[in-house]
């Protein structure tokens, strides 16, 4: 029997895949990645394991990858200010290369010749997983049952699951397609496919509607050390707790929602909504701190790098040499990104209201309009003439 390692979520699709692969004479080993999809409330991994075994898996690996996800994927993207098409903070996209890494690792350990996943043929995630697996071990076969199997609808899958005693929870049929991890939630399909319709409140899971939040603002201070968030209000937090805490806090105040039409790698435009309270807060604070400590040329150049970085993450090119090279550049820029940003959170908004850093390049004696002014205004006369020179006909 050939062995395959399946990226298993516990949902209907991947549960049917276990059986489907068994029918094609594969021994199926399930791998469940914990990227914080329980969002602080915990996910029932025991139930997921039982379901995998009941569906026919010979073995189940459950790995808590949250710390690695944060340190090796989320924080590098935060340092890079990576945002796709101005709105998407890349939670789903950042998780895929990590899942791929462990699919390959487990395949090697189990001497499996193939890996499998439950992505459809229309999305970005299939690309991200397969490109990453292909870079890490081009010899592994990749099976994507959803792209080729006979089921035409969710109902047909449910019928198949019932026929084969696969224990799935069909009662809580969700009207959306949802992907979650500690960095954020991606929600698509259902009524969201109608561009003219505002997303209904029930589409959001971790953020309150901004109109229903407290009428008074909340202030918080985020402290960064070399580009990494380390403290909230002066108190040191472990990375995972810091993000969980900001998700909770931001969610309560309606911070971190976005609604967009994005360009998928496969060429389709799609309507997606996102909830990412902690990611939103941290991106705003991080950029604000950089505005203080990076010199103008470096800051402007870094903006271009951010765009490219986000695109590489979105396209699934995490393990590419370009992405690695850009990390080298970004790491260098973060040397001075230490300091504290105070934010005001209110009614779905998050804005910086105060900033301080020992590495600040702000010089009050130069920028002031008061009497302590040290700036020699006579110098600019010649400067402007020379600056304009090449543009004069
Ligand atoms: N469009 C986003 C991306 O490509 C999210 C896709 C997440 N999948 C889902 N089932 N909602 O990263």
Image (tube, rainbow, N blue to C red):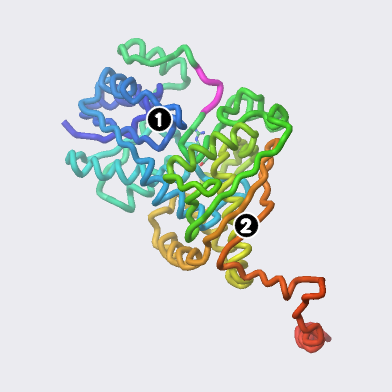
Q: Nearer the viewer, residue 153 or 128?
A: 128
Residue 320: image x %, image y %?
40, 58
Residue 152: image x %, image y %?
46, 22
As displayed, is residue 253 above or below residue 78?
A: above
Which residues are the magenta region?
Answer: 173-177
As displayed, is residue 273 above or below residue 154?
A: below
Residue 367: image x %, image y %?
75, 72
State the image quarter where residue 109 is shown. top left
Q: Nearer the viewer, residue 21 or 277?
A: 277
Is residue 308 something that shows in the picture? yes
Q: Nearer the viewer, residue 298 or 151?
A: 298
Element type where label 1 sits in the image: helix
Label 1 to label 2, Cα distance in Å? 43 Å
Residue 146's disc is: 1
Residue at 39% from the left image edge and 51% from the top image edge: 72
Residue at 56% from the left image edge and 68% from the top image edge: 359
* Residues packed near mark 1 inside 10 Å, few (<14), some (14 to 19) or many (20 plus): some
Q: Which residue is mark 2?
A: 288
In this image, 32 relative to 186: left or right? left
State the image quarter where residue 263 is shown. top right
Element type where label 2 sits in the image: helix
Residue at 70% from the left image edge and 38% from the top image edge: 217
Q: Is residue 351 magenta?
A: no
CB under 8 Å between callouts 1 and 2? no
Of pointers 1 and 2, the one earlier in the residue sequence: 1
Query: Does label 2 point to a residue whose CB lies under 8 Å from ligand 1?
Result: no
Q: Quadrant of the C terminus?
A: bottom right
Dot in front, 1 or 2: 2
């Amino acid at each position: 029997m050939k062995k395959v390692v399946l990226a298993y979520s516990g949902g209907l699709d991947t549960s049917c895949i276990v059986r489907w692969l068994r029918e094609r004479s594969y021994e199926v080993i399930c791998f469940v990645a914990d990227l914080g999809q329980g969002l602080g409330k915990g996910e029932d991994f025991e139930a997921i394991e039982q379901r995998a075994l009941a569906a026919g898996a010979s073995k189940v690996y459950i790995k808590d990858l949250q710390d690695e996800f944060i340190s090796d994927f989320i924080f590098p993207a935060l340092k890079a200010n990576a945002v796709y098409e101005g709105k998407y903070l890349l939670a789903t996209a950042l998780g895929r290369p990590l899942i791929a890494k462990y699919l390959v690792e487990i395949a090697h350990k189990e001497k499996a010749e193939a890996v499998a996943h439950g992505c459809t043929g229309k999305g970005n995630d299939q690309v991200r997983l397969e490109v990453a697996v292909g870079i890490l071990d081009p010899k592994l076969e990749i099976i994507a049952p959803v792209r080729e199997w006979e089921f035409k609808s969710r109902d047909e899958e449910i019928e198949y699951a019932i026929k084969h005693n696969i224990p799935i929870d069909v009662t809580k049929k969700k009207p959306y397609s949802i992907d979650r991890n500690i960095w954020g939630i991606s929600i698509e399909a259902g009524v969201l496919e109608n561009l003219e319709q505002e997303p209904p409140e029930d589409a959001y899971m971790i953020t309150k509607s901004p109109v229903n939040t407290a009428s008074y603002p909340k202030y918080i201070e985020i402290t960064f050390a070399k580009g990494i968030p380390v403290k909230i209000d002066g108190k040191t937090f472990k990375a995972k707790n810091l993000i969980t805490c900001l998700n909770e806090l931001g969610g309560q105040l309606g911070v971190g929602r976005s609604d967009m039409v994005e360009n998928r790698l496969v060429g389709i435009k799609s309507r997606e909504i996102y909830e990412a309270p902690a990611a939103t807060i941290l991106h705003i604070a991080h950029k604000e701190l950089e505005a203080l400590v990076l010199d103008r040329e470096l800051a402007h150049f870094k903006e271009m790098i951010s765009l490219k970085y986000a695109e590489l993450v979105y396209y699934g090119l995490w393990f590419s040499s370009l992405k690695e090279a850009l990390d080298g550049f970004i790491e260098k820029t973060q040397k001075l990104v230490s300091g504290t940003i105070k934010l005001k959170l209110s009614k779905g908004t998050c804005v910086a209201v105060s900033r301080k850093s020992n590495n600040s390049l702000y010089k009050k004696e130069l920028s002031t309009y008061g009497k302590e002014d040290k700036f020699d205004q006579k110098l600019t006369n010649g400067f402007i003439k020379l600056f304009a020179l090449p543009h004069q006909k």
